[in-house]
Image: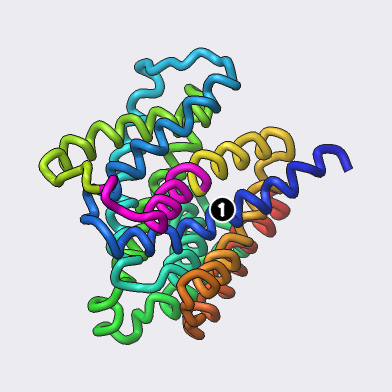
């Protein structure tokens, strides 16, 4: 099969994304949130430099793309804050499943509301399953568990990432995806530096090996490398094939959290996650066939 190596690279990218939740959990044991978030964006920005050099394409920030870069930068910072707090007070594996499975549902719902799109029956069914899956995973039926745990933060992450997705899809008309990711990380680095300036940022150099492995994994492997693979593969294989690999992320998130953090798989997260994955299938795949 032509370009078959990109299929293996996509599996690697999904594995790297899934492991990012465990890496973030490890980082929550160490330094304050503002310090962790600044260094994550700073190292991420540096890691894009060799990728940009190899691309050899001019980088430009102009009136056409600056609103997307600034908007996504704010949302990316908000996502990091919410995911940090969610993982700190909850389980990394659960966060990986809840956010990854609910984000596509939230994205579709957001697009339908903003652009007032009429839905197919398959899409309504998918949204219904997604809501049911979300209720189960987030334990909304028990209001005390929902409000007092990490689930509120995970729900915020899913909503925020839906906004990031919508902005990124529209930004492709004005800027290369890799350039887009790089500029977002640079803007986020500057903003978080201003906020964390008085937080003893150099304390990271007092941390041990586990901290730096988790930090470099999260910023470089889990973001720059995985994202670049995803974007390149999308151009070679098409968005439909590439996006289908996202279904692997929840599995990898749970598996890696079990291996690295010794986290048990929560039954309600597993059941709700499966329902949400089925929901995404109905929303994306069956709906596309209906449109054709």
Compared across the picture, whether 289 is left or right of 243 comes to: right
Where 193 sits versus 199, above or below?
above
Furthest residue toward right: 1
Furthest residue toward left: 198
In this view, the residue in front, 133 or 5, is 5
Counting every numbered tag in the picture gives 1
- The residue shown at (53%, 59%) is 18
Q: Is residue 232 magenta?
A: no
Where residue 190 sits, quadrant-wise, is top left
Q: Mark 1 = which residue?
A: 16
Check the picture and name the quadrant holding the N terminus. top right
Q: Locate residue 128, reporting x and y percent.
A: 51, 71
Where 268 sits versus 206, above or below?
below
- The residue shown at (47%, 25%) is 49
Q: Locate residue 2, reporting x and y percent.
A: 86, 38
Furthest residue toward top: 58
- The residue shown at (60%, 64%) is 121
Compared across the picture, whether 152 is left or right of 182 comes to: left
Task: State the SS at label 1.
Answer: helix
Magenta span: 204-221
Q: Locate residue 117, reporting x and y percent.
A: 49, 48
Q: Residues within 10 Å of mark 1 (few under 14, many from 20)?
A: many
* Secondary structure, magenta segment, majority class: helix
Q: Locate residue 222, reporting x and y percent.
A: 50, 49
Where 192 sits versus 282, above or below?
above
Compared across the picture, whether 18 is left or right of 114 comes to: right
In this view, the residue in front, 101 or 27, is 27
In this view, the residue in front, 209 or 154, is 209
Residue 112 visible (yes or no): no
Q: Is residue 213 magenta?
A: yes
Residue 71 visible (yes or no): yes
- The residue shown at (66%, 54%) is 244
């Amino acid at each position: 099969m032509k370009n078959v190596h990109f299929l293996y690279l996509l599996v690697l990218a999904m594995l790297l994304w899934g492991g990012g939740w465990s890496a973030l959990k490890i980082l929550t044991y160490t330094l304050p949130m503002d310090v962790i978030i600044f260094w994550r964006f700073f190292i991420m920005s540096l890691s894009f430099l060799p990728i940009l050099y190899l691309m050899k394409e001019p980088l430009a920030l102009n009136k056409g793309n600056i609103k997307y870069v600034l908007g996504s930068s704010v949302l990316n910072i908000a996502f990091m804050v919410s995911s940090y707090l969610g993982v700190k007070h909850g389980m990394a594996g659960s966060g990986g499943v809840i956010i990854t499975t609910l984000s596509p549902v939230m994205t579709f719902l957001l697009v339908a509301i903003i652009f007032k799109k009429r839905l197919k029956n398959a899409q309504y069914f998918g949204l219904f399953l997604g809501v049911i899956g979300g209720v189960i995973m987030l334990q909304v039926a028990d209001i005390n568990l929902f409000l007092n745990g990490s689930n509120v933060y995970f729900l915020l992450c899913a909503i925020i990432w839906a906004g990031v997705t919508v902005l990124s899809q529209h930004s492709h008309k004005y800027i290369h995806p890799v350039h887009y990711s790089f500029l977002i990380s640079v803007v986020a680095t500057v903003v978080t530096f201003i906020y964390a300036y008085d937080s003893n940022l150099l304390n990271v150099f007092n941390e041990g090996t586990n901290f730096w492995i988790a930090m470099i994994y999260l910023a470089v492997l889990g973001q720059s490398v995985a994202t670049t693979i995803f974007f390149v593969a999308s151009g070679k294989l098409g968005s439909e094939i590439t996006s289908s690999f996202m279904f692997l992320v929840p599995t990898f998130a749970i598996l890696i959290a079990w291996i690295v953090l010794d986290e048990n798989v929560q039954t309600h997260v597993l059941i709700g996650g499966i329902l949400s994955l089925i929901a995404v299938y109905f929303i994306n795949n069956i709906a596309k066939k209906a449109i054709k």
